[in-house]
Amino acid sequence: MTNPDKQNPVEAPDVEAAPAAKTETTQGSGTSSFSAITQRWKREDLVKKASPIARGLCLLFSLLAFIIMVSNKHGYGRNFDDYEEYKYVLAIAIISTVYTAWQTFVHLSKREFFDRRTSMLVDFSGDQIVAYLLISAASSAIPLTNRFREGQDNIFTDSAASAISMTVFAFVSLALSGLFSGYKLSTHSFI
């Protein structure tokens, strides 16, 4: 045979090797898609387990902030109810305790009180609102406590500081729960 373009002919082994290479990548991508699916399952299981744990921690910290602030009565001028900032911390600790107790109950009872879409929106919105209220309460009481600590350091200011720190811990755990509920909301198909 003559080759007018002066090109070398394609050899048969090279032609057969090309489909074999193609099947190897197909098998490789099948393995990687399988591992991607299992990783997604593990991630979804982690989100399912971590969200109620974060809410349970928020319940614990909110309850501790409530108990510590209510017991912070040490005489004239050293009662939490003499100061608006501490009353605000107490009110938000109560709201947070009730909200997280309700969410924990709903999760543990595995009952649906709303349809799935509404439930996910309530979870996300509630987590965001209550987390904002928690950090707002803590940030309003910190300056007052610092001012009291400049004058004297006693059990009243220590109790107030511990209640504020429990409120901050409750915020952090509820913010994590808000991330998890936001992830659930973004990956859920509403069609």
Image (cartoon, grey):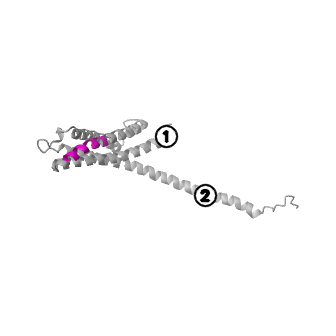
The amino acid type, in three-letter code, at marker 2 is Gln
Residue under the point 63% across and 59% down: 24
Residue located 43% across and 37% down the image: 117
Is the residue marked by circle 1 packed among few (<14), some (14-19), or many (20+) residues within 10 Å?
few
As measured in the structure, the alpha-carbon distance from the residue carrying label 1 to the one carrying label 2 is 30 Å
Q: Is residue 76 left or right of residue 97?
A: left
The residue at which mark 2 appears reads as 27
43 part of magenta stretch? no
For this orientation, the residue located farthest to the left is 75
Circle 2 Cα neighbour tier, 10 Å, few/some/many (<14 / 14–19 / ≥20):
few
Depicted 163 relative to depicted 20: above or below = above
Residue ID for mark 1 = 189
List x then y, in percent, for residue 124.
39, 40
Task: Identify the amino acid type marked 1.
Answer: Ser
Q: Relative to the observer, which residue lies in front, 109 or 11?
A: 11
State the quadrant of the N terminus: bottom right
Residue 140 visible: yes
Query: In the picture, residue 83 is in which quadrant?
Result: top left
Q: Position of residue 186 (x, y in %)?
A: 46, 42
Helix, strand, or loop for circle 2?
A: helix
Image coordinates for residue 69, horizontal then vertical, percent: 20, 44
Left or right, residue 159 beside residue 54: left
Tell me the tag on residue 21: none
91 or 15: nearer the viewer: 91
The magenta stretch is: 135-148
Percent x, y of residue 67 = 21, 45
